[in-house]
Amino acid sequence: MQREHARVKGFSRRAALLGGGQALLFSALVGRLYYLQITEADRYTMLAEDNRISLRLLPPPRGRIVDRHGVPIALNQLNYRAVLVSELTPDLGATLSSLENVLPISERERRRILREIRRKRSFVPVTIKENLDWDDVARIEVNAPSLPGVSIEVGQSRYYPFAEAAGHVLGYVAAVSEEEQGADPLLELPGFRIGKNGVEKTYDLALRGKAGSSHIEVDALGRVIRELERDEGQSGQELVLTIDSGLQDYIVHRLEGLSASAVVMDALSGEVLALVSTPGFDPNAFNKGLSEETWRDLVSNSRSPLINKSISGQYAPGSTFKMMVALAALEGGIVTPDQRFFCEGYVELGDSRFHCWKEKGHGSVDMVSALQQSCDVYFYEVARRTGIDRISEMARRFGMGTKLGIDIPSERDGLIPTRDWKLAVIGSSWQLGETLLAGIGQGYVLSTPLQLAVMTARLVNGGVAVEPHVTHDLVDGESALRRPDPAFPDLGISSASLAVVKKGMDAVANTPRGTAFRARINEKGKEMGGKTGTAQVRRISKWERESGVLKNRQRPWEERDHALFVGYAPYQNPRFVVSVVVEHGGGGSKVAAPVGRDILLETQRRIGGEGQTAVAGDEPARRDG
C-alpha cells in the first residue's frame, strides 16, 4: 500500500513537470506569435508588400529646345515601337518569320532580338523595332492573330525638325554607354537617351527632368498584374537659345555644296544668332541609330560633316588678322595712321623674298588704304617694326588664341604664337621672317571662325570684351533661370586707334578700290564694313612663282586657298558681325565676301527691327583715348 502511494506520488510529480513544461512551451509560442503578429506587424506587412509590389521608374519627357522666337528646334514626338514577349510565343522562330512578312527585319536586327530574348526573362518585353510609322503599326495590328506575343508600345523620341541645319548647335541624344553609367537610376532604363554633343550635352542634366514612378502589382515570378499608383515625374526644363532658326536655315542653304562655316553675333550682347558648319549631319539619325554604312560615310567624308568647323576648325586667318597688327602698332606708338610705306610687290629679307598678293604692288599706302586694298607689303613692314610679342598680346585681348567658353562642347584654342611658345614647343628660336608671315595672318597663326567673329565684334563695339553664348534662358515651369545681364570689361584700346581700323574696314566694302566693293550692300541704312582674307594652305615655291602660279580653279580642291571674310552692319552703327570661312574656296573677295554680304543683309531684315534683348543689357560704354 505504501509502495502504491509512492508510485502515484512520483507519477503526479512527473505529470506536473510535464504539464509545466508544456505550459512554458505554449507561453513561449504565444509570446513569439504576439511578437511576430503585433510587435513586428508593420515590418512584415512592409516586406510582404515589397514582395508583391514592384516600383518602376518612368523616364520623364525631355525638355524642349526653342530658338530666340520660341520656334521649337528640338522636341519630343510619339514613338511607336514593336515589342515581343517570348513567353506568349509558342514558336519564336515562326513568329519572327511571320513578322518579317509584315515589317522588314534585317539579319543584324534578328540576331540582336534573339540575343536579348536569351538574356532577359521570358515575360520581359524585347524591342523589335522603334520609330515605326502609322502604316507599320496598322500592318502589325491587322496581322496580330498570326503574331502571338507581338504588340505595339507608345513612347517618346527626340525629334529635330531642322535636321542638318541645326545639328552642330543642338548635338544629338543617344543611348547611354557603359562608361556613362552613373548614380542616376534613369541611366539604367532600357532605351533612355542622353545628350552626346552640342547644347544637348551641355545642358543634359537640366533637359533630362526628374523620373516618375509606377507601383505595379506582380506575381511571384514578377509578371505584371495591374498598376496601383503612378507619378509622371517632372519634365525637363525648356532651353531657350539665342539662335534664329530661320537665319540658321538660310545660311545652310546659302553655303550648300561648300565645306564652310559662318558665325553671326550681336556685337553688343555676345548673342550668337547663327552658327553654321557645312556639310552637316542629321541628329535624328543618331537618335534612331546609325547603320554601319551611314557611319562609314560620315567618318570617311573628306569635308568632315561631324566636325563643328565654327568652333573646332582652325585656320590661318589670312588678311582678316591685319586689324590686330594695325592696332598693336598704333597702341604701341610704332607707326602713325598717316605714315606711308611703298609697295612694289615684294620685300626682301636676307635671301628670301616676301610677296604681296598684287604682283605689281600697291605703290605708296597708309594704314587705311593698306587695309582697304589688303596690301601685304605694308603689313610685313608694320609687323617687322612691331614685333611678334606685341602683335600676339593684342590678338589675345581680342579673343584669339584661347577658348572663348561658348556653351557648346569641343571648342578649340586656335594659336597665337610668341617667341617663348616656339622655343618651348618647337625647340628653336623665333625668326624675323616668321613675324612677317604672322603680319598677314599666315605662318603659325590659327583661329576659329568663332574667334574671328568675336574679334570683329570687339573691334566695332568700341573695344568691349563681349563673350559669345548660344543660351538665353532655362525655363522650368513658371520660373525662368535667366542668364544674368553681362558686364563686359573694356579692353583699354583708345577710340582713336579703333576709329582708324574701322575706317579702313569701311573702305574695304564701300570704296571702289576696296577688296569687297563688288560685294557691298547697296540697301540704304544696311551698308556693311569688313575685311577679306585669303589663306594659303601650302607654300608656293620660287620655281612655281617664276613659271606661273596656277589659279585656284586649276588646282586640286585640297590645295586651293581658304576664302575668309569678317564683316559688320550697319556700318555707321554696328550691331551685327559675321565671319565666313570657305575651305579651299579660293579668294576671299570673290567667294567669302558675297556670302558675308548676303548673311548680314538677311540678318538685318530678320532681326534688325528687334529691340535690344534682355541678354544684351545696356550698350557697352565706349572709351576715349
Image (cartoon, grey):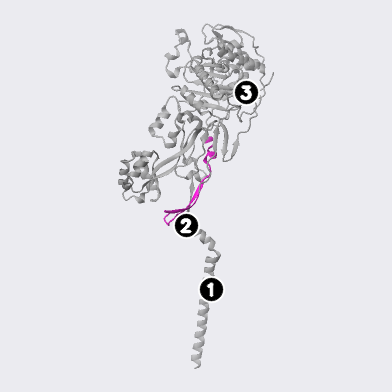
Quick one: 38 or 154, which is closer to the camera?
154
Determine whether 195 is above or below 51 in the image.
above
Image-based side of 220 in relation to 331, left or right: left
Is residue 221 covered in magenta? yes
The amino acid type found where label 2 is placed reads Asn
Where residue 377 appears, as percent x and y from the top left, is 56, 10
Furthest residue toward bottom: 1
The residue that mark 3 highlights is 397
Span colored in magenta: 201-230
Which residue shows up at 48% across the image and 24% down it?
250
Where residue 322 appears, as percent x and y from the top left, is 58, 16
Q: Are marks 3 and 1 in contact (CB under 8 Å)?
A: no
The residue that mark 1 highlights is 27
User: SS at mark 3?
Assistant: helix
Which is more N-terminal, label 2 or label 3?
A: 2
User: SS at mark 1?
Assistant: helix
How far apart in space, not on screen, are marks 2 and 1 (Cα)?
31 Å
Which is more N-terminal, label 1 or label 3?
A: 1
Determine whether 141 is above or below 426 in the image.
below
Determine whether 243 is above or below 155 in the image.
above
Residue 448 visible in the picture: no
Q: Nearer the viewer, mark 2 or mark 1?
A: 2
Where residue 493 appears, as percent x and y from the top left, is 66, 20
Is residue 414 covered in magenta? no
Determine whether 500 is above or below 157 in the image.
above
The amino acid type found where label 1 is placed reads Ser
The residue that mark 2 highlights is 51
Give the quadrant of the C terminus.
top right
How far apart in space, not on screen, are marks 3 and 2 (Cα)?
65 Å
Name the mark on residue 55: none
Which is more N-terminal, label 1 or label 2?
A: 1
Q: Residues within 10 Å of mark 3 (few under 14, many from 20)?
A: some
